[in-house]
Amino acid sequence: MRQPVASRLPQRAAFGAAMALAFAAPVGAVRAQTAPPVAIAAHSEVQGRQTRLSFTLQSCVKTEAYLLGGPARAVIDLPEVNFQIDPAAGAPAPAAATGIHPKGAAAPTAGLIASFRFGRLGPGKSRIVADLTGPAEIVSVACAPVPGAAELTLVLAPSTESAFKAAARAGARRQALADAPPPALPAPSPSDKPVVVIDPGHGGVDSGALGRNHAVEKSIVLDFAKALGARLSADGRYRVVFTRDDDRFISLGERTRLARRLNAALFVSVHADSLRRADDVSGATIYTVSDRASDAEAARIAEHENMADSSAGEETQQDSGDVNDILLDLTRRETRAFSGVFARSLGEYFKVAARLNKNPRRSAGFVVLKSPDVPSVLLELGYLSNARDVADLTSPDWRAKAAAQVAKAIDHFFAEQRPPAAAAALKATQSAGN
Ligand SMILES: [Zn+2]
C-alpha cells in the first residue's frame, strides 16, 4: 500500500519554474560542474514489514547509508544536493494538527520512520536523516533512473535491539572516519578591536523550529544575524565574525571553539522558537547559561536547542566533564556575571523595537553558551508558532529596527565594561602552556 506523503514546494509556480530551468540545462558535465542536482520531492511509505524513504532527484548521486544510536537514526550521506522541498515535509505527525504542516503533505504516519530531515552539511556535502521508531536494519540504499528523473530509495526493515546497537556502533565509526577534519579556525584578532561572534542557530540539514507560513528558524535567524553584523561592522569598532553566513550545518562544539579561539569579547547566539500547542505565546526571550534551569520552559528550550547535532545526524559527543580548576571556576563565574549584565541591558534595548515574552530573562544549560571565558547570551527572537511574531520576524523593516537595538545594547556593553580580569589571567596561563 502506498501512503503518499509527497511534498512539494509551497508555490507550485515557483516549483515549475525552478524545474523547467533545472531540466532545461544540458545533462552532463557542464551542469554537473556548475550546480548540484535538484531534489524535488520526498515521501516515506510502508510496504509490508518494510519502510521506504524516497527522494526524487534530477539525476543520480552516490550515496552512503548507515545507522546511529542514541536516538536511533538512519543517515544517508550524499554529495551536495539542492533540496527544493519544504523543510516541513518530513516533520513529525503532531505538527499536522496545528496547521503548521504544509497543505498537501502528510507527515510520515507509520512504519519505522517517525520523521526525516534533509539539507546541506557544507560545501559539496548533503545529508538525509531519518528518526526511527525502533530498531531497524538497512535492507538497501540505491539511486536509480526513473522516467525524466532519478529516485533515491532507502529501504528499512525491523531488526533486533542487539543487532541495531552493533550496526549503530559501526555507523558511528564510519562517520568518524569519513568526517573531514574541522576547518581551520581563523587567527585571533590582530588588532585590539573587540571580537563579537554572531551565531545564527542551526543551518543546513538542521532547520531548527518550523512555523507558520513556512517560516524556518535557520533562515530567519541567518537574516537577522546578517542585519546585526552589518550594523555592527558599519562604524568599525568591532571585529565581527559569524559562526555561519550561509545555509550549512555547524556543530555546537565548533561554534564555541571559534569564539574561544578568537578570544571573543562577546558571543550572541540568535534563535527563534516554536510551540506546538500554544500559538498565543509570543515575544523575545534572552537566555544565559546556568547549571539549573530557571523554569521548565527554559529547560525545554535548552534541551531542544542542545539536540542540534543529533538532528543533523551527527554522532553525539559526550560532555567531557568540567575540569575542576580554581582559575577556570573563577573565570566561569566572572564570565557568567558579564553575560548577565549584557542580557539585562539587551532586554532593555530590545524592547524598544520588539515585544518581549512575559518572562523575558531566563537561564538553562545551553551547550552553546558554556564557553568559560566568553560572555555569551542566546536571543530567542520570538515564536514561529505565533502569527504576530512570524509577521515581525519575516519583515525586513522589523529586522532592521530590532537588529539596530541589539547593536545599541552591544555598544552599551563595551562602553561600560572593563575586560574580565580572571578571563585574561586564564588566557595568559593557557597561552603560556602552549
Ligand atoms: Zn534554535
Image: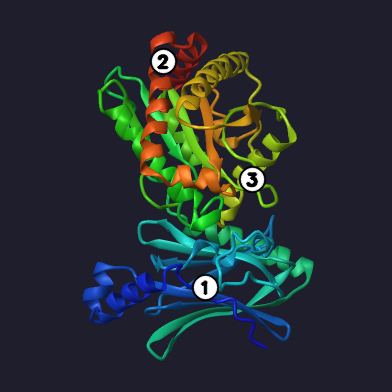
Q: Is residue 309 left or right of residue 156?
A: left
Vertical placement of residue 130 versus 60, above or below: above
Residue depicted at x 57% and y 15% = 337
Q: Is residue 286 visible in this depiction of the protein?
A: yes
Secondary structure at badge 1 equals loop
Q: Amino acid at mark 2?
A: His
Q: Nearer the viewer, residue 17 or 42?
A: 17
Q: Are marks 2 and 1 in contact (CB under 8 Å)?
A: no
Q: Nearer the viewer, residue 45 or 369?
A: 45
Image quadrant assignment for residue 66: bottom right
Write down the residue under mark 1.
7
- Nearest to N terminus: mark 3 or mark 1: 1
Vertical placement of residue 20 versus 292, above or below: below
Vertical placement of residue 265 versus 316, above or below: above
- Nearest to N terminus: mark 2 or mark 3: 3
Select label 3 or label 1 by which is in front: 1
Write down the residue under mark 3.
304
Q: Is residue 423 left or right of residue 98?
A: left
Q: Amino acid at mark 1?
A: Ser
* Relative image position of residue 200 (x, y in whole percent): 45, 41
Quarter of the C terminus within the rendering? top left
Image quadrant assignment for residue 36: bottom left
Write down the residue under mark 2.
412
Quarter of the N terminus within the rendering? bottom right
Q: Amino acid at mark 3?
A: His
Residue depicted at x 66% and y 26% = 290
Looking at the rendered structure, the number of numbered marks drawn on it comes to 3
Disc 3 within 8 angstroms of ligand 1 (CB): yes
* Relative image position of residue 99 (x, y in whole percent): 62, 61
- Is disc 2 surrounded by few (<14), some (14 to 19) or many (20+) residues within 10 Å? some
